Amino acid sequence: MSREFAVPPVVFPSGGNPTVATGGNIQQRRAPTAPFQPSRPSNSGIPFMSFEIGSAATNTAGTIGVGTGPLGGAANFDDEEPLLVELGIHPDQIWKKTKSILNPFRVNPTFHKDSDLSGPIFLYLSFCLFQLLAGKIQFGVILGWIVVSSIFLYIVFNMLAGRHGNLDLHTCTSVIGYCLLPVVILSAVSLFVPQNGAIRFGIAGVFVIWATRACTNLMVAVADGGEEHRGLIAYACFLIYTLFSLLVIF
């Protein structure tokens, strides 16, 4: 036995929106409201915060390399210092200090008052490179000897100078590194000298004396209290550069 239910008719107006007739009243659907939109700042100085693509494109269009500084002025990259200067590397000073070692009789200590480690690192890498060309991989050995030699000479000098000694470890390492130049030249010359010969030992002796004299003069000049102990300081420098020369000879 089937039962029939009364279904009210559905009437669609000519506007296209469906309406439902309930109790003789036609209720139309409400038009959808726009989503929440944040307020747009009128004087925002940041382009991407203005929510306007057109204004952002207009504001960002400009010359490359010119920005706005914190005080509103234009900051030009041409006024900035070179990268090497910002890293503390001064090639002109390194060249002057290296050139001053070439003459062991007239070493200019003026350039070595301001110590640095850029030049010694370059000489260290050069020394390791020439040793590598000779078939000797001694990067760690040379670096370890430089550290030990710097600490050794630093302790010896300050013990001899006493209260008048003002030598710091950074200056001591810088002087030893720059005076390594004769040993670097020795390692380059030894590539063309026959092995196990008296000539090789004679050339090594000349370069060791060169490095010892230059290092002694600089140590006495850059620090106080070492003039009266020049002989002992020269002996310590002689031991240091003799060890480096043994790496070249053998």
Image: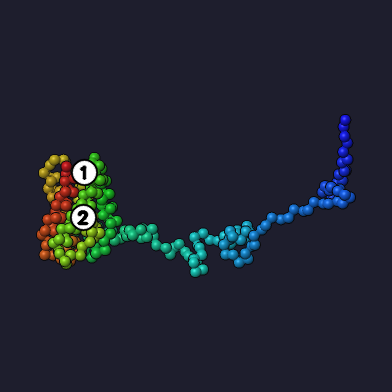
Indicate the quadrant where residue 132 lies.
top left
Mark 1 sits on what residue?
A: 191
Q: Nearer the viewer, residue 160 or 11?
A: 11
The residue lying at 17 percent from left, 51 percent from top is: 241
Secondary element at tag 1: helix
| Mark 2 / mark 1, whichever is N-terminal | 2
**Is residue 13 something that shows in the picture?**
no
The answer to whether 18 appears left or right of 46 in the picture is: right
- Give the Cα separation between the discs numbered 2 and 1: 27 Å
Residue at image position (14%, 52%) is 239
> Residue 4 in the image: x percent, y percent?
88, 36
Q: Nearer the viewer, residue 78 or 229?
A: 229
Callout in the foreground (2, 1) = 2
**Residue at far top of view:** 1
Where is the C terminus found, in terms of image quarters?
top left
Disc 2 on helix, strand or loop? helix
Residue 192 on image: x %, y %: 20, 43
Residue at image position (23%, 59%) is 169
* Residue 227 visible in the shown view: yes
Q: In this view, does 166 lie above or below 35?
A: below
Residue tagged by mark 2? 150
**Dot 1: few (<14), some (14–19), or many (≥20) neighbours within 10 Å?**
some
Colour convention: rainbow
Question: Dot 2 surroundings within 10 Å: few (below 14), some, or many (20 or more)?
Answer: many
231 to the left or right of 177: left
Q: Identify the amino acid type marked 1.
A: Leu
